[in-house]
Amino acid sequence: MDCPTTTQEAFSMATKRFFNDAASECYTHCVKDFLNKEMNLSEKNCVNTCYKKQMIIYDNVEDLMINK
């Protein structure tokens, strides 16, 4: 993996990592039925709620980083 050369590149890499980790965390937490091709309503609602919470965290951390 290449090392970031600028603060912007480092922030971009960290942002991508955060979104990937958030999606993975929500999927692992919410999806329980692997026999069906589609997620059921409960799983969809769980993923949506989980991801919204992750985005609130991201927004708060981003604000802290920008205002630092």
Image (spheres, rainbow, N blue to C red):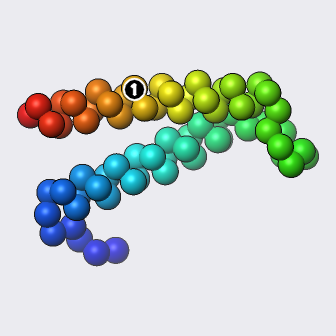
Where, by quadrant of the figure, is residue 63 drawn? top left
Q: Is residue 11 left or right of residue 39?
A: left
Question: Which residue: 82% across, 32% down?
Answer: 40
Judging by the rendered image, the residue that carries numbered circle 1 is: 56
Q: Residue 45: x, y in percent?
A: 69, 25
Residue occupying the far left of the picture: 68
Where, by quadrant of the figure, is residue 6 drawn? bottom left
Q: Is residue 44 left or right of residue 22?
A: right
Relative to 67, residue 2 above or below: below
Residue in front for this viewpoint, 30 or 38: 38
Quadrant of the image for the C terminus? top left
Question: Which residue: 29% across, 55% down?
Answer: 12
Element under label 1? Answer: helix
Alpha-carbon neighbours of circle 1 within 10 Å: few (<14), some, or many (≥20)?
Answer: few
Relative to 58, residue 38 above or below: below
Q: Residue 17: x, y in percent?
A: 40, 53
Q: Residue 65: x, y in percent?
A: 17, 37
Residue occupying the far bottom of the picture: 2
Q: Is residue 42 left or right of residue 21?
A: right
Q: Residue 10: x, y in percent?
A: 23, 58
Question: Which residue: 15% across, 37% down?
Answer: 66
Residue in front for this viewpoint, 52 or 27: 52
Question: Which residue: 34% across, 49% down?
Answer: 15
Relative to 66, residue 9 above or below: below
**Numbered-mark total:** 1
Amino acid type at circle 1 is Ile
